[in-house]
Image: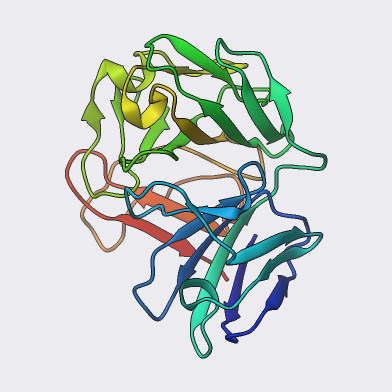
Amino acid sequence: NTVTYSGTGAAQSISGLGFSPAMVWTKERDGTSYHEIHDIVRGANKQIFPNATDAEESTTKLTSFDGDGFSLAAHNSINESGKTYVGWCWDAGNGSPVSNNDGSITSTVKASQANGFSVVSYTGNGSGGSTIGHGLSSAPEMVIVKNRTDTENWSVFNASVGNTKALTLNATDAALTSTNYWNDTSPSATAVSLGSDNSTNGSGDSMVAYCFHSVVGYSSIGSYTGNGSSSGPTVTTGFRPGFVMIKRIDVSNNWIIQDTT
């Protein structure tokens, strides 16, 4: 679900999601402050920036994940008086994060198999061919990974792009080819395959992965070919989407996010 809110410059709670979010992605709408992601596996006091290479930072900006939303402290990038913000929020079901041994690297996972979404933390080992359990019932079609320890690009697996390539969430780059991202191996129903690249499997580094697969009537991950016309192609999802994220993959171009809220 998506929420919009106005900053107050004082502690406030944002509600109306209809669930307790496992991941909250916020952005100032009328300013240039960074995008920020907080998730329940890393803890509310940890932030990473989808538009930047920065390592994870400790923070007191988002103070809690609540039953129907989340709570904020006063901070210019997430709750400045007079500023407007958006929060894109994902539901990973009930319960606490659990240890997962489905991969060769033990992971900590908060997953909703019904929603096709999980948050996965793990420690990289730098070895191509390693795997991490993702906690879902089907193979993820999109995996967004960030090295939390190092200043490093984000790497994105998308099934439509293939397992020999990765997109860069914080950059405009076209899809980049290297076996070191995913070991040229697509995710399975239990685990995500990793190469040796520092962005996906930094040796001794703390990592986080956000995993998604399509769910009928709920979410859809795919691709399409543009026609360059103002009457563009119709992309069938099977439902009316509330959130759409698009990236051109054959040349350098911006990521685009639109939502109905």
Residue at the spot x=31%, y=37% of the render? 167
- In this view, the residue in front, 64 or 112, is 64
> Could you say which quadrant of the image residue 145 lies in?
top left
Residue 179 drawn at (x, y percent) = 28, 16
Residue 152 drawn at (x, y percent) = 31, 40
Examine the rendering and report whether any part of residue 25 can be seen: yes
Q: How is the image coloured?
A: rainbow
Residue at the spot x=51%, y=34% of the render? 209
Residue 75 drawn at (x, y percent) = 52, 76
Position above or below: 35 against 145: below
Q: Is residue 54 left or right of residue 82?
A: left
Position above or below: 14 against 209: below
| The C terminus - image quarter | bottom right
Residue 38 drawn at (x, y percent) = 57, 54
| The N terminus - image quarter | bottom right
Residue at the spot x=32%, y=48% of the render? 53
> Could you say which quadrant of the image residue 97 lies in?
top right
Q: Is residue 37 left or right of residue 247?
A: right
Residue at the spot x=49%, y=33% of the render? 206
